[in-house]
Image (tube, grey):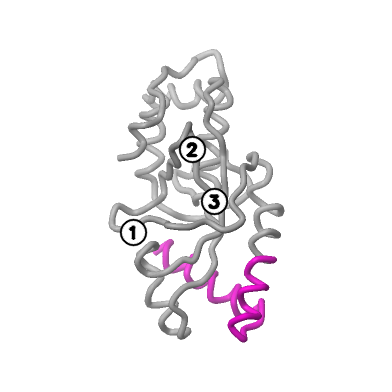
Amino acid sequence: MIVGRLPDVPLDADLPISASLISQGLEHYQAVARWIATLPFGRNTNPLDWRLVLSEKRGTSSTKHAFLAELARELALPINLYFGIYLMDGKNTPGVGETLASNNLPSIPEAHCFLRYGRWNIDVTRSPKAEPILQFFEEQQINSEQIGDFKRTVHRNFLLKWATSQGLSLTKAWAIREACMAALSQ
């Protein structure tokens, strides 16, 4: 698993995020990343609050990676939060193929968060069955506060251009995207 490329440093009981993880039996950054990778995919009750990953034991690419980025920041690790837009299809995102096919689409643009450590992109939300994401559009480093409105605005602007080129409205394209997200949460 690519998580093994992350630094395996101990958590610090004197720091707030670390302390909450240590109380749950996690003691190293890599162990936390492996644990978060096992949590189900699903939106948190407040999709902007990455802290809920710990209490709700689930998250999306945004909240799971923002959680790990904040823990890295707390531990002064050179790990950054990124997001990019890729063309999501049934091969690189197993679970969405049927939804896309029922809408006569081979793919749809999706915003996706991940971590970057050195030259490695680290993604704790990808299925082992998934083909790799070969290209990101609009890729950029963000901070945890940007997983909401900022990311959504960039995504919607990209989706609008794409939808127009496909003869779809933004409303229809966003509804298809939301149906794909619902399929992933099942």
Kindly report the distance in space between the C-alpha atoms of the residues bearing marks 3 and 2.
10 Å
Which numbered disc flags the more N-terminal residue, 1 or 3? 3
Can you give x and y, in whole percent of width and height, for residue 32 in the image? 40, 31
**Furthest residue in direction top, as rendered:** 14
Image-based side of 119 in relation to 25, left or right: right
Please give the label number shown on residue 131: 1
Asked if 93 appears above or below 148 in the picture, the reply is: below
- For the record, the magenta segment spans 157-186
Kindly report the distance in space between the C-alpha atoms of the residues bearing marks 1 and 2.
28 Å
Please give the label number shown on residue 7: none
Q: Nearer the viewer, mark 1 or mark 3?
A: 1
In this figure, which residue is indicated by the disc labeled 3? 44
Asked if 154 appears above or below 162 in the picture, the reply is: above
Can you give x and y, in whole percent of width and height, for residue 150 in the image? 70, 52
* Residue 47 drawn in magenta: no
In this figure, which residue is indicated by the disc labeled 2? 54
Kindly report the distance in space between the C-alpha atoms of the residues bearing marks 1 and 3.
26 Å
Asked if disc 3 and disc 2 are in contact, CB closer than 8 Å, the reply is no
Image-based side of 19 in relation to 139, left or right: left
Depth check: give the residue in front, 68 or 118.
118
Q: Residue flagged by tag 1: what amino acid is it?
A: Glu
Asked if 147 appears above or below 26 in the picture, the reply is: below
Q: Main secondary structure of the magenta part?
A: helix
Quadrant of the image occupied by residue 169? bottom right
Q: Residue flagged by tag 3: what amino acid is it?
A: Asn
Depth check: give the residue in front, 9 or 32.
9
Can you give x and y, in whole percent of width and height, for residue 185 in the image? 43, 61
Which residue appears at 41% of the width and 81% of the height? Answer: 101
Secondary element under disc 2, as helix, strand or loop, is: helix
Q: Nearer the viewer, mark 1 or mark 2?
A: 1
Which numbered disc flags the more N-terminal residue, 3 or 2? 3
